[in-house]
Amino acid sequence: MFRSGRFVADALGDVDDEQVQPNGVDLRLGAVYEQVEPGRIGTDGKTVGERRELDPDEGGDGDEGTAVYRLDPGGYVAGYADTVRIPEGHVGFLYPRSSLLRNSCMLDTAVWDAGYEGRGEGLLEVYHPVELEAGARIAQLVLAEANHADTYDGSYQREGIE
Ligand SMILES: O=c1ccn([C@H]2C[C@H](O)[C@@H](COP(=O)(O)OP(=O)(O)OP(=O)(O)O)O2)c(=O)[nH]1
């Protein structure tokens, strides 16, 4: 069974009311990176390639205090601003906000394991130039009840929060 948005909000702990949706919680954009060196996925482990953090244009549209990423078509890594916590007995799935799709962008995501805690990342595909403001809601996390073997204890545990 998928949990309600209120349940997901309680699991995450620190979200604004506008992030709480009927079936999940919206995650906000934290940072945008561009990969600059190859990574490696092997049979004996993996490495994530070097990336550089993009600078948002400060004061976009003459609006003081806003930080806007103006992205040309390409592949980027998006870091989320919110700390995700997947409670035991659950698995998380993240979907792009549909307004991203409607603007010719896609957010590719993987499985969020029981016990994971951190500010995760996703692959942001941009097919038409787009403006994304830092802190804007770009994705929605849903939680489903699930059996699991152990809990997450991998290299991304507590990423972005230590
Ligand atoms: O789109 C996603 C999906 C998951 N995660 C987080 C939560 C998940 O629990 C963790 C690890 O994901 P996964 O197990 O798929 O990564 P891996 O490459 O197999 O790494 P590890 O060896 O640490 O399990 O990354 C993200 O940041 N983004």
Image (cartoon, helix red, strand yellow):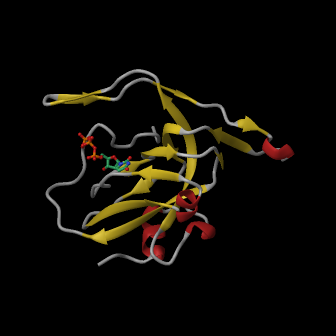
Locate the N terminus and report the quarter of the image it occupies: bottom left
Residue 114: where, in percent of width, then height? 27, 58
- Which residue is found at the position 25% from the left and 50% from the top? 152
Q: Report whether 105 appears left or right of 38.
A: right
Task: Report the front residue among 52 and 151.
Answer: 52
Q: Report whether 26 appears left or right of 93.
A: right
Q: Is residue 14 visible?
A: no
Q: Is residue 152 above or below residue 44?
A: below
Q: Report whether 98 appears left or right of 158.
A: right
Q: Report whether 128 appears left or right of 68.
A: left
Number of labels in the image equals 0
Task: Report the front residue among 72 and 63.
Answer: 72
Q: Is residue 76 above or below residue 28?
A: above
Residue 136: where, in percent of width, then height? 63, 54
- Which residue is found at the position 56% from the left and 57% from the top? 100
**Quadrant of residue 121 within the rendered picture:** top left
- Which residue is found at the position 46% from the left and 40% from the top? 160
- Which residue is found at the position 84% from the left and 47% from the top? 63
Task: Report the front residue among 160 and 96.
Answer: 96
Q: Is residue 44 above or below residue 116?
A: above
